[in-house]
Each structure stands twice: as structure tokens, then as C-alpha cells.
Amino acid sequence: MTGNVTTAPGAAAGSTRTLLTCGIIAGPLYIVVVVLQMLTRDGFDLGRHPASLLSNGDLGWIQIANFLVTGLLFVAGAVGLRRVLGPSAGRGGTWGPRLIGVFGAGIVAAAFFSADPVDGFPPGTPTGPPTTVSVPGLVHFLVAGVGFLALIAACFVFARRFAAAGRRGWSASSTVTGALFLASWMSIFALAGNRAANVAFAVAIALVLVWTSLLAAHRLTRPGEE
């Protein structure tokens, strides 16, 4: 005797909604936890220090947990996006969620490989650039770089998808978000140590994380629309 095992539509929709809700929560949660640490951790200066440095010191476990939890939430949100877009969604529906998933996986990896202390943070660290880079520190910035590239690509993939669907507002906002994030990221290499560039990059990260939340919310509230 044989039979087909099926999943009730309501149950499937419910699980997809949960995954998309994870995607909505991920960005704001990361931002709030980082901002609270910036305001309370002695010696942290947004103009000098990337948020990754918060993984160091006695309270470094907070940022490590932030990386781990929000990274998993991003991965879950990416799965939800793939489900709601469906198998017939084309390249944008396939690669967009995958790229966001890669970004989430990069954040998870960053939890296990902390950035090296640098430029006076945590307190007691010598000021100025580091003289050496540890293996965990190198891996941290490698996985972060892969994650950033994936998220930038996701912005442009979804921008193209929205443009094809005639959603000009979403297409423009996705393009601008990706372009600003890329430009600000490049600026911290071109203008090493520049306070304005460091702050602009932090703001751009917040912007792109908000974009991911709005994208997940859009798919949650309008699953049948582009």
C-alpha cells in the first residue's frame, strides 16, 4: 500500500511566515544591540572602531551572541524569501535569497572568529593600526567581506527583479541601498582612518540591514506581489 505525504497549506504558510518574521527581526535586532554597546562600552569610538571590535573584552560575549543570533535569523529569513518567491520566480527569486543567506552565514562565522583588538579598544590596547593580524582576525574579515559582497549583490539582484515587475520604487531603493553600501565600504579602504568614512560605513550597514527587514516584511504582507 502506498500513499503521498502532503503538508497542510496552512502549516506551510505558517512556517514560512515564521521564517520571514525572523528576517524582519534580524536587522533591527543587530542594530539595537550594537548601538546599546556603543553607548555603554568604555573606549569605543564609532569614528575609529568597527562594530566587530565589540567582540573583544569582558563583555565581548554580547557581540558574539549578537553575531550568532542575528546571523541565524538572516539565514532563516532567506529561506522564507525563497519559499514565498517559489520555484518559478526566476534568477532573482533564486539568487536573491541565496545571497542573503550567504550574508547570514558570514555573520554566524564572524561569531566564531573575532576581530583583533585595535586602536585603543578594548581599553589597554595600543593606539594605532595593529602590527600583526591573528588567524581568527584574518578569517573574521574574510567572512565579513564575503558576506558584504553577497548582500550588495542581493540588493542589485532584487533591484533588477523589482524593475522587471514594474515596481520602480522598490527597484530604485534597492539600487541606491546597494550602491551606498558598496561606496561606503570602499571608502574605508581608500580613506583609512578617516572618521567620516568610518561613520558613513556604519550608517550604510544600518541602512542595508533595514532594507533586508523591509524586504522580508514586503514578502510577508504581500506574498503574491512582486
Image: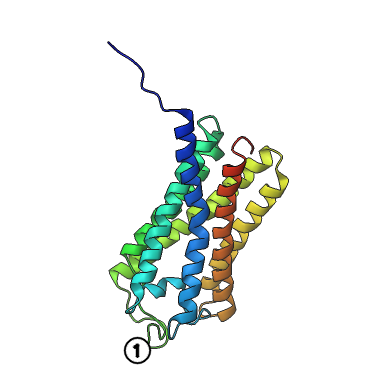
Q: Residue at x 27, y 10 (%)?
A: 1
> Which residue is at the front of the view, 67 or 93?
67
Residue 98: in sight, yes or no? Answer: no
The image position of residue 18, as x and y in percent, is 47, 45
Residue at (40%, 64%) from the top-left corner?
66
Q: Identify the secondary structure beneath mark 1.
A: loop
Residue 208, by quadrant, is bottom right
Q: Quadrant of residue 44?
A: bottom left
In the rendered view, would you say 145 is above or below 60?
above
Point 46% across, 81% down: residue: 40
Identify which residue is drawn at 53% across, 72% down: 188
Depth check: give the residue in front, 157 or 27: 27
| Crowd rating for badge 1 (residues with CA inside 10 Å; few <14, some 14–19, many 20+) | few
* Image location of residue 156, percent across then percent down: 59, 49
Identify whether 82 is placed above or below 113. Answer: above
Residue 186 drawn at (x, y percent): 54, 67
Residue 107: x and y in percent read 41, 59
Q: Is residue 78 left or right of residue 118?
A: right
Label 1 is placed on what type of residue?
A: Gly
Which image quarter: residue 106?
bottom left
Residue pointed to by mark 1: 124
